[in-house]
Amino acid sequence: MQPCHCTVPGCCLSYTISYADLTLKSPKTKAELFFFIRLHKMAVPPSYADLGKSAKDIFNKGYGFGMVKLDVKTKAASGVEFKTSGSSNTDTSKVVGSLETKYKRSEYGLTFTEKWNTDNTLGTEIIIEDQIAKGLKLTFDTTFSPNTGKKSGKVKTAYKREYVNLGCDVDFDFAGPTIHGAAVVGYEGWLAGYQMSFETAKSKMTQNNFAVGYKTGDFQLHTNVNDGSEFGGSIYQKVSDKLETAVNLAWTAGSNSTRFGIAAKYQLDKDASISAKVNNTSLVGVGYTQTLRPGVKLTLSALVDGKSINSGGHKLGLGLELEA
């Protein structure tokens, strides 16, 4: 068996079949060959939070309405990664920033991350992956605010193997920990997931979500029910190598209105793409992303209120990403 190097989005093959494998098994017909390949499919479903991610990305990536943002990523010779981010809100003129340093020891499956932001909150994250068991990821996350003295801690566990993706997080609080759990199972493109949250201090279930979906290489369908009152769904389709489209629907029990949106992304060439989206409230968003040179990416975006084009209130956005 050889590692898969497929770059097709949504590819569920974790391994490809080598010539030696075929020779060993010697399938005689196309049907036997098809069955043989299916046996070697090792599909790992996404986490619950990533269900419908392709459609979400079409709606969210490539836009930055009302913001001027700068992101800088660098990597030292020692392997330490630095990420600096700063943004200014054009409406409030508020400026926020963050600094993150990350160091990986791949041979031990360890990742150390230190974080700081302009709210003067310090964070530390330690990740241990594929060491205790294959597919198991442990995360220890702590934050501390010197100004207020507020502290928080989280322990996250994630386990993924063929056909299953499990997660259990514990948020520690003085009132009592909150437990978050999620599970996704997948088989031949079909996905089903469940997500819950339980507050131990109140002995109360605060989140109870279900999701069902279907995923292939160029098509994805996702539906979800949150707390029995919020219903949503999304469709993603890769029409061609250059064009991707998505549709999003949402409805809340007790409300007569259905929220929906349509979005698309078109790759003009290898360095430029254009995005557009519109929703049922006549908000129209457009975005343009251009790679100026390797490691330099520029994003321009605009949000227009179609119901009041002449009255103003429209938003512009500018983003610049630097990586070295």
Image: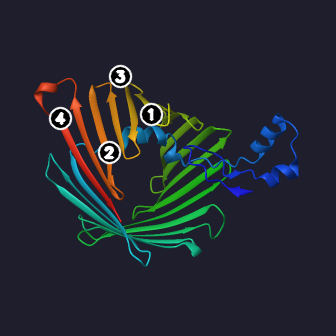
Query: Which residue is denoted by mark 1 in the rendering?
Result: 243
Residue denoted by label 4: 314
Question: For the residue marked with disc 4, what is the amino acid?
Answer: His
Q: Do the residues labelled 3 and 4 touch (CB within 8 Å)?
A: no
What is the x, y in percent for residue 97?
A: 25, 62
Q: At 41% from the left edge and 38% from the top edge, which residue is drawn?
A: 58
For the residue carrying disc 3, how many other residues have a C-alpha within 10 Å: few (<14), some (14-19), or many (20+)?
A: few
Q: Which of 30 and 237 is in front in this view?
A: 30
* Mark whose residue sits in front, 3 or 1: 1
- Residue 80 found in image quarter: bottom left
Which is nearer the N-term, disc 2 or disc 4? 2
Q: How far apart are marks 2 and 4 (CA)?
A: 20 Å
Q: Which quadrant, please, contains the N terminus?
A: bottom right
State left or right for residue 304 relative to residue 204.
Answer: left
- Residue plotted at (48% across, 48% down): 204
Q: Where is residue 78 in the image (x, y as percent from the top left)?
A: 43, 79
Structural crowding at the residue carrying mark 2, measured as other residues with C-alpha within 10 Å and reported as few (<14), some (14–19) or many (≥20): many
**Residue tagged 2:** 289
